[in-house]
Amino acid sequence: MQTQDAIVKAIENEPTISKHIDRNHWVSGSSTVVYPIMISESHVNVQMDTDRNYFNGAIKRVTEKHKDMFSAGYFCKGDGSRPSVLRFVLLKNNK
């Protein structure tokens, strides 16, 4: 997998995304802490401070610029119990 720092930098360098990253963490369920940027083996979730979806262009710029890291990206609207997120799918060979 690409280093976590490189993944975070690739996302935070896009101004439209960086401006709306929710800088707070929250607790899901009773004990799972959810941080603004969460990296798993298959994807990256970026917690957003808005439910408005105007990130399509920014997502496209990130995925096209970093084809070595991401295979896709999309917006997932929050349901009121959790914030909206941008999800970037990591390339399988980066595991």
Image (cartoon, helix red, strand yellow):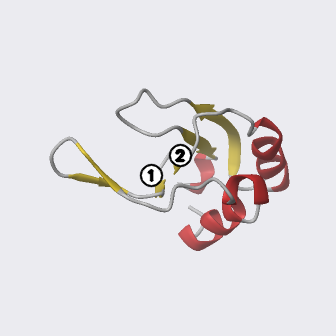
Toward the left, the furthest residue is 30
Q: Is residue 72 above or below residue 62?
A: above
Residue 43, numbered label: 2
Q: Is residue 24 left or right of residue 68?
A: left
Relative image position of residue 22 (x, y in whole percent): 52, 55
Quarter of image, res 5: bottom right
Q: Is residue 83 left or right of residue 59?
A: left
Question: Hey, what amino acid is under mark 2?
Answer: His
Relative image position of residue 11 (x, y in whole percent): 68, 59
Residue 94, numbered label: none
Is residue 67 something that shows in the picture? no
Element under disc 2: strand
CA gap between label 1 and label 2 equals 5 Å
Q: Is residue 3 left or right of residue 61?
A: left
Q: Is residue 74 above or below residue 44?
A: above
Quarter of image, res 76: top right
Q: Is residue 54 above or below residue 39?
A: above
Question: Hey, what amino acid is under mark 1?
Answer: Ser
Say which of 6 and 85 sits in front.
85
Is residue 17 something that shows in the picture? yes
Q: Which residue is mark 1?
A: 40
Near mark 2 (Cα within 10 A), the count class, few <14, some 14-19 or many ≥20, is some
- The residue under the point 34% across, 33% down is 81
Relative image position of residue 3 (x, y in whole percent): 57, 70
Near mark 1 (Cα within 10 A), the count class, few <14, some 14-19 or many ≥20, is few
Say which of 38 and 79 sits in front.
79
Say which of 54 and 6 sits in front.
54
Do callouts 1 and 2 mark residues in contact (Cβ within 8 Å)? yes
Q: Is residue 52 above or below residue 90?
A: above
